Image (spheres, grey):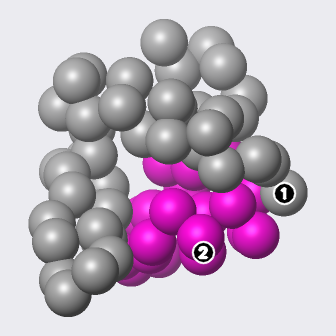
């Protein structure tokens, strides 16, 4: 799963703190549906958590530090 460089990049970005899908889309230079897909895979693997804040969902890396 972490052999995908986009997932690794997203995970690395999230280690710097919480980010929205829009933040990740801009930083990783990927399309929003692709970022959402990778976040779902990372969430299912227990590497990423999300929480709702207003109309946004914030994601963060879990553990590993």
Q: Circle 1 sits in a helix, a strand or a loop, which is it?
A: loop
Give the residue drawn at x 31%, y 55%: 61
Left or right: 21 in relation to 22: left
Is residue 14 depicted above or below 12 in this figure? below
Structural distance between the alpha carbons of marks 1 and 2: 10 Å
What residue range appears in magenta? 9-28
Quick check: is 39 in the magenta stretch?
Answer: no
From the image, tell me which residue sits under label 2. Answer: 23
Q: Answer few, some or many: residues within 10 Å of disc 1's Cα (few below 14, many 20 plus, some between 14 and 19).
A: few
Quick check: is 14 in the magenta stretch?
Answer: yes
- Residue 44 image offset from top left, x and y in percent: 22, 24
Total marks placed: 2
Q: Is residue 65 visible?
A: no
Q: Answer few, some or many: residues within 10 Å of disc 2's Cα (few below 14, many 20 plus, some between 14 and 19).
A: some
From the image, tell me which residue sits under label 1. Answer: 29
Give the residue drawn at x 53%, y 20%: 2
Is residue 60 depicted above or below 33 in this figure? below
- Residue 35 image offset from top left, x and y in percent: 59, 43
Image quadrant in which the C terminus is located:
bottom left
Give the residue drawn at x 20%, y 52%: 49
Left or right: 41 in relation to 31: left
Q: Are marks 1 and 2 in contact (CB under 8 Å)?
A: no
Q: Residue furthest bottom?
A: 54
- Residue 47 image offset from top left, x and y in percent: 27, 38
């Amino acid at each position: 799963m972490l052999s995908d460089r986009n997932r690794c990049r997203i995970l690395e970005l999230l280690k710097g703190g919480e980010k929205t899908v829009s933040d990740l889309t801009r930083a990783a230079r990927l399309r929003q549906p692709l970022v959402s897909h990778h976040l779902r895979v990372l969430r299912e693997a227990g590497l990423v958590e999300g929480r709702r804040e207003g109309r946004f969902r914030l994601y963060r890396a879990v553990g590993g530090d």
